[in-house]
Amino acid sequence: MQQVQDLIESIRAAGGRVTPQRIAVIEEIRKSDSHPTIDYLFDKVNVAQPSLSKKTVYQIVNDLAEIGAVSLVDVGTGQLRIDPYVEHSHDHFVCTKCKSVVDVPSEIKTSISTKIDQYGEINSIDTVYRGICKKCCLA
């Protein structure tokens, strides 16, 4: 995951403005360890930035996704998740109890890719594992 300052520079390089709201959203994404949702970010950042709207959070996150600073992933929890770890390919584990999402190192899926190549060019492969996380198992 990129550092806050690196993300700010990426926004500037893409012609975007660096506002207190953008910085607050970026910092909250960096703090989260479970691929936050827009609602989660809004609830956290709105405490310090009460004038912030949910629409603004959506726009900030979409702007970050456009410049490749985050990716938006649908892991079947009902809301898109913000994945700040875009530097390396990885899979996701979703806890079916607490809905947390964690990164799982991905295995190279060459045998599958070779079989699917006959249908077209593969741009990405998304694997989501579902189960109960260790924290919920111990509770």
Image (cartoon, helix red, strand yellow):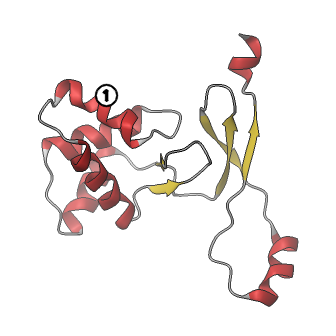
Residue 108 x, y percent position in the rendering: 78, 64
Number of numbered callouts drawn = 1
Q: In the picture shown, does residue 53 fall above or below 14?
A: above
* Amino acid type shown at disc 1: Lys
Q: Quadrant of the C terminus?
A: top right
Residue 127 x, y percent position in the rendering: 72, 56
Residue 101, by quadrant, is top right
- Please indicate whether residue 110 sits to the left or right of residue 85 in the image: right
Residue 15, by quadrant, is bottom left
Q: In the picture shown, does residue 96 fall above or below 117?
A: above
Residue 71 x, y percent position in the rendering: 47, 57
Residue 49, by quadrant, is top left
- Please indicate whether residue 11 sits to the left or right of residue 138 in the image: left
Q: Residue at x 21, y 49 (%)?
A: 56
Residue that mark 1 sits on: 44
Viewer-closest of 105 and 134: 134
Q: In the picture shown, does residue 31 fall above or below 110?
A: above
Instruction: Give neighbour class at mark 1: few <14, some 14-19, many 20+ (Cα, 10 Å).
Output: some
Task: Find numbered disc 1 in the image and state the secondary structure of the residue it sits on.
Answer: helix
Viewer-closest of 16 and 72: 72
Give the residue at the far top of this rendering: 139
Q: In the picture shown, does residue 23 fall above or below 117?
A: above
Q: Residue at x 70, y 45 (%)?
A: 104
- Please indicate whether residue 74 sits to the left or right of residue 71 in the image: right
